[in-house]
Image: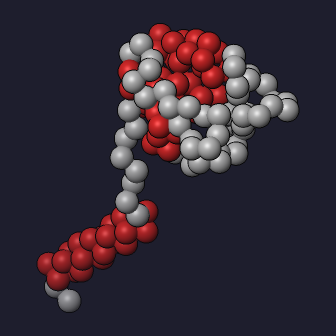
Amino acid sequence: MTVSAKGGSVRAALAITLLLTLTACGPSEPPSPADAFRNDPIAMQRGRLLYNGTCGGYCHGSSPGPRDAPYLFDCTWLHGGTDADIFRVISEGVPETRMVSFGGNLPEGDDDIWRLVAYITSQTPKSC
């Protein structure tokens, strides 16, 4: 085998390895709008204040215990645990439950909902 043939074989092997690696990883989830708020201390503070004044103060609470709304800082998500799922639940509510729609009802609209998503998910255990 010539040197150029060996080089071509190595490149082909690398290309196949890369293709298999990318295929095994599958499609990645698109970036979440909440990501922009997770690294912004002011946005996270607003998310915390929104949670305490709107969610935690009335229904969900800030510590585990008996209540008629789920505790949100554990690993259990009843309606999906992705950022998009949490956004949808906050925005649209959950039919036949006390979870009302907050879409269009917060001062800064969807950005406030994404701040809530960023805050809530930042408080869940990393082991989830």
Percent coordinates x, y for residue 113 in the rendering: 46, 26
Q: Residue furthest front?
A: 96
Q: Is residue 87 left or right of residue 30?
A: right
Residue at the (54%, 12%) spot, across then down: 45
User: Who's the residue at 40% across and 50% down the image?
Assistant: 29
Examine the rendering and report whether any part of residue 41 can be seen.
no
Q: Position of residue 92 (x, y in %)?
A: 47, 37
From this viewpoint, which residue is outermost toward the right? Answer: 66
Q: Which residue is farthest bottom?
A: 1
Q: Quadrant of residue 68?
A: top right
- Examine the rendered structure and indicate whether residue 41 appears above or below residue 31: above
Q: Residue at x 24, y 76 (%)?
A: 12
For the residue pair 53 and 25, the one nearer the viewer reads as: 53
For the C terminus, the image quarter is top right
What is the x, y in percent for residue 33? 38, 32
Q: Nearer the viewer, residue 108 or 68?
A: 68
Report the side of 128 relative to 92 (left or right).
right
- Marks counted in the figure total 0
Position of the N terminus by quadrant:
bottom left
Residue 13 in the image, given as x and y percentages of width and height? 30, 76
Q: Is residue 58 left or right of residue 95?
A: right
Residue 32 in view, yes or no: yes
Residue, x 72% and y 34% (percent of image)? 69
What scheme was used to colour the molecule? Answer: secondary structure
Vertically, is 43 above or below 94? above
Along the line of sight, the residue nearer the viewer: 15 or 25: 25
